[in-house]
Image (spheres, helix red, strand yellow):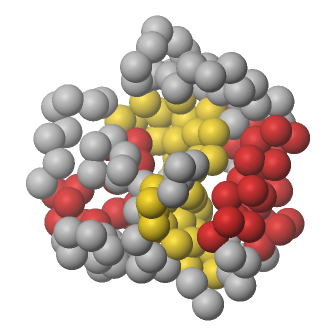
Amino acid sequence: MPKVFVGVGSNIDRERSVRAGVADLRARYGELQVSSVYESDAVGFEGDAFYNLVVAFDTEASVDEVVVSLADIEDCHGRVRNGERFAARTLDMDLLLYGDAILKTGSYHVPRDEIPRYAFVLWPLAEIAPELHHPENGERYSDMWENFNKRIQVLRPIVFKW
């Protein structure tokens, strides 16, 4: 059974949105491994700061079923899909990893391209899967985070009450 890692983010009613999104993941997939919650400035547009975290779970669902499920959860929580890649969001759920699969389709890439590029993805992933190796470059996530240029993106751990 593959372990799936999902990036979760919100900058609209972010506490409620993150809490509800994680609860929906738990209801669909059972036991979750949940990183700390981090606050980061919006990337690619002017907007309110985001809360970000990474959630992991084991599933027998196919990668396509997981992608559809994540979009369904986003939609249930008011996600607006207006075509703009960088925009404010009630809930953003991105499939980061599906086991050690390397998949590129028109609608998703696994592993997600943002893993090595954004602190708000890499730090929480390295927190809950430090010894796991990136399927494409073979590096451990803890090493990737250690070598990440932390001056280019400010990330603040927050105390989050579940």
Q: Nearer the viewer, residue 111 or 48?
A: 111
> Residue at (35%, 35%) from the top-left corner?
155
Residue at left offset 47%, top offset 33%: 39
Question: Residue farthest to the front?
Answer: 106
The x, y position of residue 35, in whole percent, is: 51, 59
Please indicate whether residue 111 sits to the left or right of residue 70 in the image. Answer: left
Residue 149 x/y as whole percent: 14, 41
> Quick check: 13 above or below 47?
below
Residue farthest top in this picture = 46
Q: Nearer the viewer, residue 103 or 123?
A: 103
Residue 36 visible in rendering: yes
Question: At 12% from the left edge and 54% from the top edge, which residue is drawn?
Answer: 147
> Which one is nearer the viewer's eye here, 52 or 45?
45
Total marks placed = 0
Q: Position of residue 132 (x, y in %)?
A: 34, 78
- On the image, the x and y values in percent for residue 146 come to 16, 57
Residue 51 vertical placement versus 83 (above, below): below
- Taking 84 as reference, is 128 left or right? left
In which quadrant of the rendered view does residue 58 lie? bottom right
Decide if residue 7 is in sight here: no
Which picture quadrant has residue 1? bottom right
**Up-down relation of residue 12 to residue 151 (above or below):** above
Establish if 70 lies above or below 4: above
Q: Residue at x 40, y 19 (%)?
A: 44
Q: Quadrant of residue 63?
A: bottom right
Q: Nearer the viewer, residue 2 or 153?
A: 2
